Image (spheres, coloured by chain):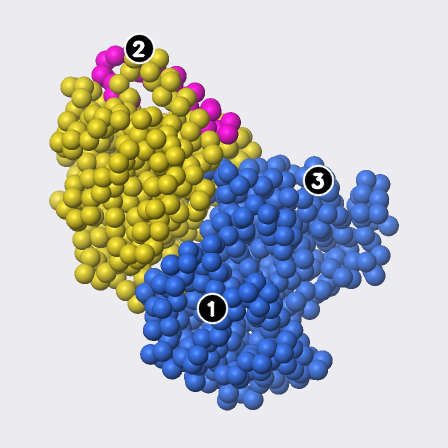
Chain colours: A blue, B yellow
Amino acid sequence: MNSLAQSLGDRFGSRLLTAPAATAQYAQSEGHHACQPPSLVAQPETVEEVQLLVKMAAQEKYAIVAYGAGTSLEGNVAVTATDTLCIDFGRMNRIVEVSPADLLCVVEPGVTREQLNTDIRATGLFFPVDPGANATLGGMISTRASGTTTVRYGSMRENILGLKVVTADGSLISTGTRARKSASGYDLTHLFTGAEGTLGLIVEASLRLHGQPEKILAATWNFGTAGGAVDTVIETIQSGVPIARMELLDEAAIRACNRQSSLGLPEQPMLFLEFHGSESSVSDQLELVRLIGEGHGGGRLQFATATEERNALWKARHQALWAAKAMVPGAVAWITDICVPISQLSNAIARAKAAIDASDLFAPILGHVGDGNFHVFFILRPDDAAAWDRARIINEAMIDHALSVGGTCTGEHGIGLGKRQAMQREHGAESVATMRLIKDALDPSGLFNPGKIFLD
Amino acid sequence: MNSLAQSLGDRFGSRLLTAPAATAQYAQSEGHHACQPPSLVAQPETVEEVQLLVKMAAQEKYAIVAYGAGTSLEGNVAVTATDTLCIDFGRMNRIVEVSPADLLCVVEPGVTREQLNTDIRATGLFFPVDPGANATLGGMISTRASGTTTVRYGSMRENILGLKVVTADGSLISTGTRARKSASGYDLTHLFTGAEGTLGLIVEASLRLHGQPEKILAATWNFGTAGGAVDTVIETIQSGVPIARMELLDEAAIRACNRQSSLGLPEQPMLFLEFHGSESSVSDQLELVRLIGEGHGGGRLQFATATEERNALWKARHQALWAAKAMVPGAVAWITDICVPISQLSNAIARAKAAIDASDLFAPILGHVGDGNFHVFFILRPDDAAAWDRARIINEAMIDHALSVGGTCTGEHGIGLGKRQAMQREHGAESVATMRLIKDALDPSGLFNPGKIFLD
């Protein structure tokens, strides 16, 4: 047994995993990237233990990869170095404080979004960011996650007040405050948000909470064409309607969801909508959106007003990935993630659909279209190299097109391993060099999550 | 004439200022910090000229201070080094693009917020961030400015999509995209936002625009006590009412505004409110806020529905600083800027009022109270050293109290020269050391705005 394992074992006991059967689960993710298991996994319970792990790993020249729920999609926590200590934040899952008076909570990084929302339900507040997966909040911060409600409530970027972070020398720093705004010094909160664990380890976060709306109205809405659905989205956003959710599922996605969740929906391009507000505001919003959609061939709006009905609908939406995979036995999914300015969305989706149709691949389209963000779920057999090549070509073309119209290669999944080359194209060499200066300044020995974000 | 002045003079002609009478105006600001004039002032018209200035100043070991409208309050653009090149962005004031379809615009840094809003009025869109002063957008980005509408529309932090920045080696980098969200790489946009020109020079910005609301209703509302007004604010925020403006003026501020602008308002603590939305949403919001305020001793709401009436009201609010100064001939203003979590606002304002009352200073209180942010305007004669000392003691006590309840020493004015010590107390040595690592990595020779943010 090596010396780091020995000394950590003395301190962490059964919370240090070394057996291949135990460490192997940390090589799993929901993405398509091949991962190797870490040499060691530690499960700290306190900030002080995290600081100790950083200092000891640095001393022994181990890399550190932080691990939450394993739901990332771009190899964001993949192990790339032979000597890697994986820090599993699963035991740091306490909700430290809930302050309804200040509409905020303080959580440890291993708290999941569902855990948080279950815990605070009785306060009348909720945490809105909803990427679908029941990710940990530490992971959601680190990938600057967003999801179905971002069109109204913002992404993680807009919902973090401050962080506590363990840096490369084992120091603990605080960023931000509990106030709603501040002009005090560099915005370290946003620097660590989306840094994918390459600059430090998030050990606590203060998050904004929102009041549960007086009225919630969910609906599904079928369209003759995806174009009609997308044009409805574009005009809704341009009209400034504060809609809470606006999701597109194309006919292939609906077919998969019908099969998995018995939704019985017409197998046509479909919008899943949700309106939040007072009775009168929801009714104002609905009438405006209905008018817009009727001009673009929208069918009959089907409402889900009861909480159970609504939950069933969103559960089906969230299970779309599994539903799509289940259509092709043994297949895995490769999920794309471009996000474009809203005026470009119609064209971007039309191009993607045309490329998929011409490819003979099974690839449903789903998206947080209110943000200009959508995903192609390429459903591929692992050994069908030709199909992977076709998917790769389509994805690269989608990214190039998104970049050419001012969009981004990743709306919400992050760079990880998979988007490193695309990130260079997106920001340009000088901008990436500036990021690199920051990485080298804050993590000079390359301790944290090596091989991610930057091409070396 | 020194060699930098010589070579810049050859290129910039009359756009290089060297005469003391010309450079002296760059030693003015609206703050109370003593400034010296820069040795040289250049007025570039293009990005390439800014790159050239950076390269030449670096070569000649001049410091660079970026200058917008000169409206900052904490010595944020004060000249501290003997050899300083001031870059006046006044000629880079083009609105490069307005895209109603994507609810965004692209501007040069010297565009002022009033210029932008006048220019885009016909599109039905507006840029919401309103610090009162007609600052340049470059300056507002650099201080992470906010203002009267931040309670609803966010501060600069929430309204910037991307930047172009000239870095210390004269490179031009791009940050962000035109998409509403992105998870691509480090968030350089937010790093340069609020960096006060210490990390690079902002030469272009893409900003989010918002639709002009269907209905705007402004009102003034007098209260028997400041406490009643503040409790009304706290409950309104806690209830999640999407109010667009919620400003407090205490009786001293109202007295000053009455005298300056003939408002004829009762000289009592007063809320200035504004509601944005559809007819029904505005009426919902108003009824809820009215109920809350009536429970806290609110008098009769006085509405300003006509555009001219409304504009007169907000103009008076924005002129409160001049109105307060005019109460004491020859006096200058020193403006405090704490921001606290909303639950702590009542206590913070009560403490400030008690300290002012006990001090015999003339010091109206005004604030963006919906954000938990308020200002004490200490109106002081320049030579009354004892009064300055009393103001200093009150300000330090306010800051210490704000920090003790999780607030910040500056809600919106930035650190500049004046808050450097307070920033250390706010973030702690380790966090400031992390900021310093970033400063040293991005500006290794200390070219940009020396002496600001950090205590050396």
Question: Which residue is the site of mark 2?
Answer: B386
CA distance separating discs 3 and 2: 49 Å
First to last magenta residue range = B378-405
Residue B209 visible in image: no
Residue A359 visible in image: yes
Marks 1,3: beta carbons within 8 A: no
Q: Nearer the viewer, mark 1 or mark 2?
A: 1
The amino acid pointed to by label 3 is Thr
- Looking at the image, residue B358 sits to the left or right of residue B261; the answer is right
**Residue neighbourhood size for the residue with mark 2, other residues' Cα within 10 Å, grouped as few (<14), some (14–19), many (≥20):** few
Quadrant of image for the C terminus of chain A: bottom right
Q: Residue at x 73, y 42 (%)?
A: A45
**Residue neighbourhood size for the residue with mark 3, other residues' Cα within 10 Å, grouped as few (<14), some (14–19), many (≥20):** some
The amino acid pointed to by label 1 is Leu
Q: Is residue B168 magenta?
A: no
The chain under label 2 reads B
